[in-house]
Image (cartoon, helix red, strand yellow):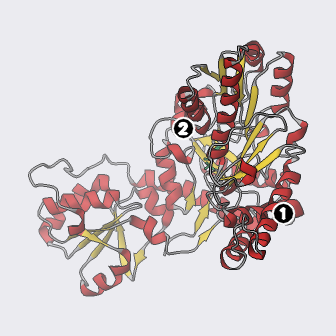
Amino acid sequence: MLPQEIYLDANATTPVLPAAAAAAQQVMGQAYGNPSSSHSAGLNAKALLDAARERARRLLGAGDGRLLFTSGATESLQTAVLSALCALRERRQAGQAIGGLLLYGATEHKAVPESLAHWNRLLGLNLELRALPVDRQGRHDLALLRAWGPDAAMVSTMAANNETGAVSDLGGIEATLQQAGSPAYWVVDCVQALGKLPLELARTRIDYAAFSGHKLYAPKGVGMLYVRQGAPYTALMAGGGQEAGARAGTENMAGIAALGAVLAALEDGATFRTHAQLQAFRQQLADSLGAAFPGLVFNTPLDNALPTTLNFAVPQLSSKELLDVFDAAGLRVSAGSACSASKPEPSTVLQAMGLTDWQCRSAVRLSFGPAADQDFIQAACAGIARAGAALRAGKAATSQPDQPLPLDDALAPALPEEQFSLDWAGLPAFLRGHPQAQLVDVREASESLASAITEIAGRAVRNIPLSRLSGELPQWRQQAPGPLVFFCRSGNRSAKAAQCLRRLGFEQAWHLAGGLASASAMTPARHVANA
Ligand code: PLP
């Protein structure tokens, strides 16, 4: 009934790799010991923990550094910031000069500037937070880093950006800090780099590096923190002495086992595609986008971006319009980072890169995981073509001006939604009991065309966008139709339609709660390798 879901938002989160889910299941069901226990079950768990850590150390080239398991990158970054700032405070209290600046790349994930501000305030350091500008490609301004470096107490620069995929010049940053004689502690957010870029941490001057499991096929709630040997460390959580006293709290063994399985897959090379294969996949997607949306521009030069991320804009189309039609075609993409998805403001990352206002407002991010395969990419390309065609056909079909409902009609009080809500599970029975009921899709024509839903539970569907619904009122008033059942993507627009019609006297106006999104939760999704 619904188009198959094609998940293209891997930079927000990924599904769990089957091998990782199996490893987690095994830990939860059989190897459930507490790694701190001294009996055999505990020893088994400890062996599993050690093995996952050893694997991570090898893969990241952690050398003599520490490798801790955490709840995710936000905690890892937090711990890095706390550790560096505590050391700075001690040095200052001992009368040493520490520099006055906390520098962070202008395109960092919010977890960095927010934790810098938080701990700077709580520790009473009152250092100046300053964003290090980036250029049009998303690369840090090394001339400014050279100028500011000597006064920097700490520098934070991500390895690759989550919205644009822009890859930072970590080698250049390291050389610049060296040339500037900067004493700064250096934090690198490696979340989007894991599995996509080679990392040899101990060969660098990086003091702290943060990782997140759920961006690479492990579950949410597990991450890692690398701490260079000799870099200062302050635990964020104190308690039972786990992680050699560096991070208290019983270890998330299911998450760690799952992450261990992902790292094993990275090591054996069989599950993940090579850089060249990923680049070829991205090119196919880029070509499909270009063909489906004339005038489309890429917001980041592809040769300086992760091979799994595309950020683009289409003239005269807002992010929201594009996202709606993609979603209707089954493609799950986003306008930017998942944390800011609920805010309609233009992307600050793109603004920092100096993109034009319309590009910032129209930006769409498409990202896939490194386990993607050719079939998946082909299905994604077909979905893109469908979305483009639906958008053109939808525009052609709705050339007349809108006829919105009088939604602000204050004549009648608003009704509680339960009074006009139906749920999807009860829809077939409702339709059987009401042979005259009409199903009305109130999404825009382009969305309706993209999802090609012509019937639900055997009943034909009519598309009348919410913006045109009032045009139907005279006819409905005349004919006194049976129940009108409105639906849309999330249940928002359909609730408005039903509410308004009820206020206008249509006692049999209903809406499907949760929209098609809740119905699609019942259908299988297409992820990456569909493994
Ligand atoms: N850093 C980057 C670049 C990210 O993309 C994310 C995820 O949103 C984070 C940090 C935060 O990671 P987590 O969800 O593991 O706390």
Q: Which residue is mark 1?
A: 51
At x 52%, y 29%, the residue is: 357
For the residue pair 338 and 294, the one nearer the viewer reads as 338
At x 61%, y 61%, the residue is: 7
The image quarter containing residue 517 is bottom left
What amino acid is at disc 2?
Pro
In the image, which is nearer the foreground, mark 2 or mark 1? Answer: 1
Q: Which mark is residue 315?
A: 2
CB at mark 1 closer than 8 A to ligand 1?
no
SS at badge 2:
loop
What amino acid is at disc 1?
Ala
Question: Left of 286 or right of it: where is 54?
Answer: right
Callout 2–callout 1 Cβ contact below 8 Å: no
The image quarter containing residue 173 is top right
At x 24%, y 83%, the residue is: 434
- Circle 2 crowding by C-alpha within 10 Å: few under 14, some 14–19, many from 20: few
